Image (tube, coloured by chain):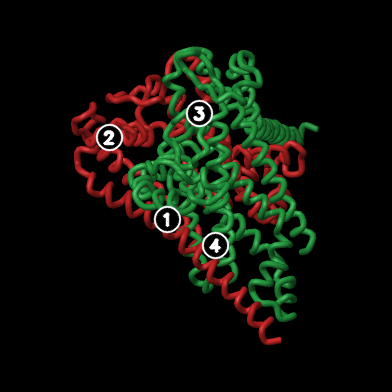
Amino acid sequence: MTAYAPLDRTRSRGAAADRIFNAVTVGAAWLVLIVLLGAAASMAWGGRLAFKTFGLKFITSSDWDAVGGQFGALVPIYGTLVTSAIALIIAVPVSIGIALFLTEIAPRWTRGPIGIAIELLAAIPSIIYGMWGLFVFAPVMAADVEPWVNDHLGQWPVVGPLFSGPPIGIGMLTAGIVLGIMIIPFIAAVARDVFNQVPPPLKESAIALGSTRWEVLNRVSLPYARSAIIGAIFLGLGRALGETMAVTFVLGNAHDLSVSLLMPSNSIAAAIANEFTEADTDLYRSSLIALAFLLFIVTVIVLSFAKLLLLRINRTHGRTH
Amino acid sequence: MPSRLLTRRLADWLAFLFASAATLFGLFWLFWILWTTLAHGFAALNGKLFTEMTPPPGSEGGLLNAFYGSVAMILLALVIGTPLGIAAGTYLAENGRYSRLAKVVSFLNDVLLSAPSIVIGLFVYELAVVPAGRFSGYAGALALALILLPIVVRTSDEALRLVPDQMREAAFALGIPRWRVTSRILYKAAATAISTGILLGVARIAGETAPLLFTALGNQFWSAQLNQPLASVPVVIFQYAMSPYDEWHTLAWAGAFILTVFVLGLNLAVRVVARRGK
């Protein structure tokens, strides 16, 4: 036995080090869970005063009065949903177009550079989008786009009221467009990867049967990738809902509910960014944290849904190969 | 049936046209935003940026304190976030590869990756600012570290998975314990990919504004102390751009220029190097 003692000792030392190493990695993995759950729990805890005081009225009332101590978050909730909807209306077709261009149309040598250029759009810090939106894009909206929108779309039946209002450049329409530009690269990058995962034999068979490129996309690639494309769209939606700085610059921080998309409004993230450091009462601060809680829960659900849909194509993809 | 063929060809042509237009649409905004930032920012550049502090309203100055604050908080965020991220990534790819915990963490890590950064800011406010009773550079760095964490977890997980299993098997066959296999062999093989991810993470947190608003807050004066409110480039850009003063707007553009060049430069450099490596 004594002859093997040194070896045993090294072995047991190795085993001890292994146990420590393993514990460190497990702990770090738990940390990711703790951050996510901790953020949700701390928002719920911080917002409890607002939820207790206002109950359901917190999300149904549009009365946001810091002086009177009344906090109803309908306006920021509405503004968040409307700007994200505008963003999706713009970003979804454009992103799918870009993905189609990058996978099927562009000459091979241009795919890398164009793909990188689109990805750079995602790398630009959101504060830069905000500054550009405030100083460059909003004036253009005010001077050229919104008067035109007023004169044309504003006259239409039913949707007219959405598009008539003072052309001041700052408002839900501008914010929605900026958000749309910001989420294009996220949806486009995932959609491109998804299209690239469509098994070539499927596409080749369709081409062999005489399909045009559009028919291959519309009847083979899109149906094959449908759930993952929806996942990509939800990923973009998750980004749009939580985007803060760009929206804060161009939304106008108003607390009035208005039908017109040209009017200033608010979003959950923008309200928090603008008002949190100025919130001077416990109830005010708690109301903003309660808003953060709602935002966090909704984005986590949207992003989880996106992830589930994206996981599915990987699994199908795994089976076919 | 020539007319049917014609409509099919027309549809194909329209799809082609639409996809090309969509790409031009995307590139159009990229160039517009870049052009604006570079043109306005370049005009605002001068030597004082790096030698003077942020000025009071209506006077000129620089951004030295903001640069210092940003660099200090990014470095500290790296010190906190990188080892934890790599350790968690190691669990996902190595120690716990087939475990249920790894599946759950991997899933939620991707959720955290896209979660609103302003909520992370509020979380750190509750976690660090309220107990300490004041805003501080430490809190700002912690918020940035929490943004960085999921990025490092994801890249180190992916990088380690790319290391061929033969390497692990060969090392285990020599009787090397797992921690040495991982630290001496696998990390070395995955080093380029992991550092690529960390650099992209730096580019991401350098521009983050929302998580710093309620943690580091900002500081108009020179302060090297991390336990005090600390200025940062993005927060200064935000405050100055939203102000009514022309001098502040000019400084905001200068900050935006430097931030954009840094972030996009880092992104491009990393991508070019990664591409050449392949």
Residue at screen point 70% across, 59% down: A225
- Mark 3 residue crowding within 10 angstroms, few (<14) / some (14–19) / many (20+): many
Q: Quadrant of residue A62?
A: top right
Q: Is residue A189 left or right of residue B43?
A: right
Q: CA distance from mark 3 to mark 1?
A: 29 Å
Residue at screen point 74% across, 36% down: B101
Q: CA distance from mark 2 to mark 4?
A: 39 Å
Q: Earlier in the sequence, mark 1 or mark 2?
A: 1
Residue B63 - label: 2
Type of residue at label 3?
Gly
The answer to which of A280 and A21 lies nearer the viewer is A280
Q: Are marks 1 and 2 on the same chain?
A: yes
Type of residue at label 4?
Ile
Chain B, chosen colour in render? red
Residue B262 seen anywhere in this rendered image of the structure: no
Q: Earlier in the sequence, mark 2 or mark 3?
A: 2
Q: In green, which chain?
A: A
Q: Are marks 1 and 4 on the same chain?
A: no
Residue at screen point 23% across, 44% down: B44
The answer to which of B191 and A19 lies nearer the viewer is B191
Foreground mark, 2 or 4, reads: 4
Residue B121 - label: 3
Q: Give x and y (percent) for residue A108.
A: 53, 72
Q: Give x and y (percent) for residue A203.
A: 71, 72
Q: Quadrant of residue B141?
A: top left
Q: Chain of mark 3?
A: B
Q: What residue did someone put label 1 on?
A: B29
